[in-house]
Amino acid sequence: MSAGVAALRKFARRAPEAAERCELCGAAIPAGHEHLVDPSKRELKCACGACAVLFPGLEGARFLRVRPRAELLADLRFSDEQWDALHIPVGLAFFFRSSAAGRVVAFYPSPAGATESLVGLEAWAAIERENPGLLQLEPDVEALLVHRVGNAREHYRVSIDRCYRLVGLVRLHWRGFSGGAEAQEEIGRFFAGLRGARA
């Protein structure tokens, strides 16, 4: 038996990578699986379709179903002055109405994970007055995702799981003070995916 054939057989016998599991019932789930959010803990849970349909999004429920969404808000009015008034130290952030906190909260991706930034009520109210559509964001499960890195001035209405996916990318790939080329490439790919998304 040639060394090449032996190597191929050894590769073929390797155990498959462990599949992701539903965090409610333990069933194997595909890469594009659904998510549930725990509003009190602001945590996402991976879910199979059968478990996800058990949580239709009723107010006060322990878990809320997160329905995939990514929509570029090309007409959103959000000036540099309004951004500065929010005092967020980086050019990436997401905002959502937290039912547990009873207000809009803001987080930005960092090497340590999702970092909360206090939102001034007056500053946010001014943004909502100019953009009443923001009042339609579903509490806990939808967010305004802002991308203002470099010359970018993009705003998206997205499902909250997409925000935490961005947080995970930053945490995984960030290197040094500026992040490094790999992190910037991953962030660029993430937003390119959002621009091409239809959900």
Image (spheres, grey):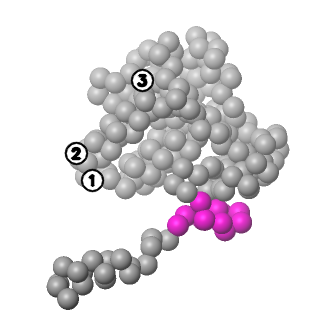
- What main secondary structure does the magenta stretch of the protein show? loop
Residue 24 included in the magenta stretch of the image: yes
Kindly give the residue lying farthest to the front in the view shown.
Answer: 1
Residue assigned mark 2: 181
Badges 2 and 3: C-beta atoms under 8 Å apart? no
> For residue 15, what is the image quadrant?
bottom left
**Residue 148 lies in the magenta-colored region:** no
Select label 1 or label 3 by which is in front. Answer: 3
Amino acid type at circle 3 is Glu
Residue 126 horizontal/vertical position (percent): 58, 15
Residue 193 picture location, percent across and down: 41, 35
Q: Which residue is mark 1?
A: 175
Asked whether 106 or 165 is in front, the reply is: 165
Q: Quadrant of residue 125?
A: top right
- Decide which of 39, 80 is in the foreground and name it: 39
Label annotation for residue 154: 3
- Image point 44% across, 14% down: which residue? 79
Mark pair 2, 1: CA separation: 9 Å
Q: Position of residue 27 (x, y in %)?
A: 66, 66
Cα–Cα span, label 2 and label 3:
21 Å
Measure the alpha-carbon separation of dots 1 and 3.
24 Å
Q: Of callouts 1 and 3, which one flags the residue occurring earlier in the amino acid sequence?
A: 3
- Comparing 90 with 75, the one in front is 75
Q: Quadrant of residue 97?
A: top right
Q: Which residues are magenta?
A: 19-29
